[in-house]
Image (cartoon, rainbow, N blue to C red):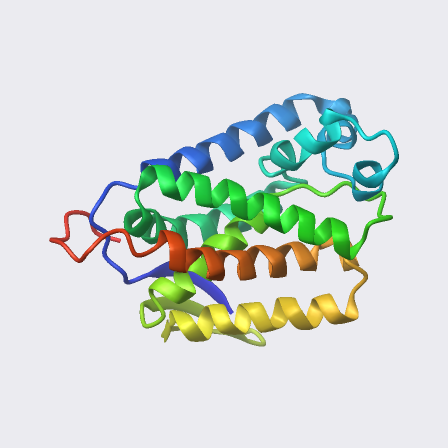
Amino acid sequence: MIPLRDLNPRRTFPAVTIGLILINVLAFLYQISLGAGFERFIMRSAFIPDEFFAPGGTAADARSILVSMFLHGGIMHLGGNMLYLWIFGDNVEDRMGHVLYLIFYLLSGVAATLAHAFSAPHSTIPAVGASGAISGVLGAYLILFPGARVMTLIPFGFYMRMTEMPAIVVLGLWFVLQFLSGLVGDGAGGGVAWWAHIGGFVFGVGLAFLFGRRRSPSQVRWSA
């Protein structure tokens, strides 16, 4: 099940969401410009739980929590994350306001990374990607816009069907899949930090009640 776009109008221009997408894209372009140094850069900059918890950990290890949120392991990794951020981020930003939304996004990323760290404290696998922070956005969207319609592509073997589904179904099923994968995985099963997704989502759900009620309904000025 692949969400393609939502049918949820917004009132303000999603400057922060677009800015975050641009930063992620530019960071990835920088990564690939390194050529053979790509993997070395990832190992030096990514978040690694074992190093974070090691005695004598440095400020650089803590700083990697923030840096890793803007790095990606490949074009598909980047593309999938940015698609979700674009579909769901603009409305969350519209509801919270630009500044609170940016704070919310970064805090969600930190919470997601720490959830991954505590689920696999001895992992030496570098963790990168915006998916933890974006999971927080998905959790907030579920709370703030549960009935919003989402155009979704559903594969049936070689047959694809596009249909509208409520956000509570799309995002609810997404979370169930992450949770079940986290239960049977090892914290980063198959290269995916499932508990980062779970932690970010749960954090986003909780913070949505604090950050998401700032604006009252107003005239729509921008289409979704």
Q: Is residue 95 above or below residue 22?
A: below
Q: Position of residue 52 (x, y in %)?
A: 79, 37
Q: Is residue 150 above or below residue 200?
A: below
Q: Position of residue 107 (x, y in %)?
A: 53, 44
Instruction: Name the residue: 46% across, 53% down.
Output: 137
Instruction: Name the residue: 51% across, 69% down.
Output: 1
Say which of 149 and 106 sits in front: 106
Q: Position of residue 201 (x, y in %)?
A: 54, 59
- Give the left or right position of residue 34, taking residue 203 as reference: right
Q: Is residue 164 above or below residue 111?
A: below
Outermost left residue: 219
Instruction: Name the residue: 34% across, 48% down.
Output: 90
Q: Is residue 209 above or below residue 157?
A: above
Instruction: Name the residue: 36% across, 66% down.
Output: 150
Snapshot quadrant of residue 66: top right
Can residue 161 be seen here? The reply is: no
Can residue 57 be seen here? The reply is: yes
- Give the left or right position of residue 19, taking residue 178 as reference: left
Count the labels in the image: 0
- Give the left or right position of residue 19, taking residue 177 as reference: left
Q: Position of residue 224 (x, y in %)?
A: 26, 53
